[in-house]
Image (cartoon, rainbow, N blue to C red):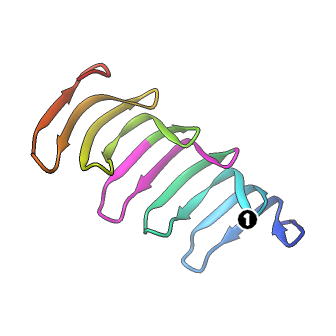
């Protein structure tokens, strides 16, 4: 690919030693538009499409503990799809996402084991 001031810029493809690749348009050393697989520092991986430097289009996140978020991403958020999401406060949500929101499924408070059902985007 091309470089500007020592940084990736323009069309290119980067292949890492472990086989992951990022293909597409780069800006300021980051994938901007394209497809590929990205491994984050915590071991989480993303496979899918990027637009404007964000996760956008079909993709999936795979977390080191086996959790999975898969579907259509928009502006870096799961827009339509399914998966398990664990928030920092210990609330775990498993089910369907629509328009970037929890839609139908179950949320659990891991500290109290209380469960709440979601239907049509509401508890």
Q: Is residue 24 left or right of residue 79?
A: right
Q: Is residue 56 left or right of residue 34?
A: left
Q: Who is closer to the viewer here, 76 or 1?
A: 76
Q: Quadrant of residue 103?
A: top left
Residue lying farthest to the bottom in this orientation: 17
Q: Quadrant of residue 94?
A: top left
Q: Residue 105: where, in percent of width, then height?
A: 23, 32
Q: What residue appears at the point 32 percent right and 22 percent down from the top-left corner?
A: 121
Q: Is residue 28 left or right of residue 21?
A: right
Q: Residue 36: where, in percent of width, then height?
A: 60, 58
Q: Which residues are magenta?
A: 52-70
Q: Is residue 116 above or below residue 40?
A: above
Residue lying farthest to the right in this orientation: 5
Q: Who is closer to the viewer here, 111 or 32?
A: 111
What secondary structure is the magenta-colored segment mainly? strand
Query: Does the magenta-highlighted stretch encompass residue 66?
Result: yes
Assign the C terminus to one quadrant of the image: top left
Q: Quadrant of residue 17?
A: bottom right
Q: What residue appears at the point 82 percent right and 68 percent down from the top-left corner?
A: 7
Q: Who is closer to the viewer here, 91 or 56?
A: 91
Q: What residue appears at the point 32 percent right and 33 percent down from the top-left corner?
A: 96
Query: Does the magenta-highlighted stretch encompass residue 83?
Result: no
Q: Residue 89: where, in percent of width, then height?
A: 28, 48
Q: What residue appears at the point 70 percent right and 69 percent down from the top-left corner?
A: 14
Q: Which residue is mark 1?
A: 13
């Amino acid at each position: 690919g091309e470089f500007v001031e020592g940084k990736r810029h323009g069309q290119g493809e980067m292949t890492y030693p472990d086989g992951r690749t990022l293909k597409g348009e780069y800006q300021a050393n980051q994938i901007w538009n394209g497809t590929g697989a990205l491994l984050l520092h915590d071991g989480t991986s993303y496979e899918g499409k990027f637009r404007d430097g964000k996760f956008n289009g079909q993709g999936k996140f795979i977390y080191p503990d086996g959790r999975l978020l898969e579907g259509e991403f928009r502006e870096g958020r799961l827009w339509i799809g399914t998966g398990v999401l664990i928030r920092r406060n210990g609330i775990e949500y498993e089910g369907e996402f629509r328009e970037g929101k929890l839609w139908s499924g179950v949320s659990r408070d891991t500290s109290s084991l209380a469960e709440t059902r979601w239907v049509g985007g509401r508890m």
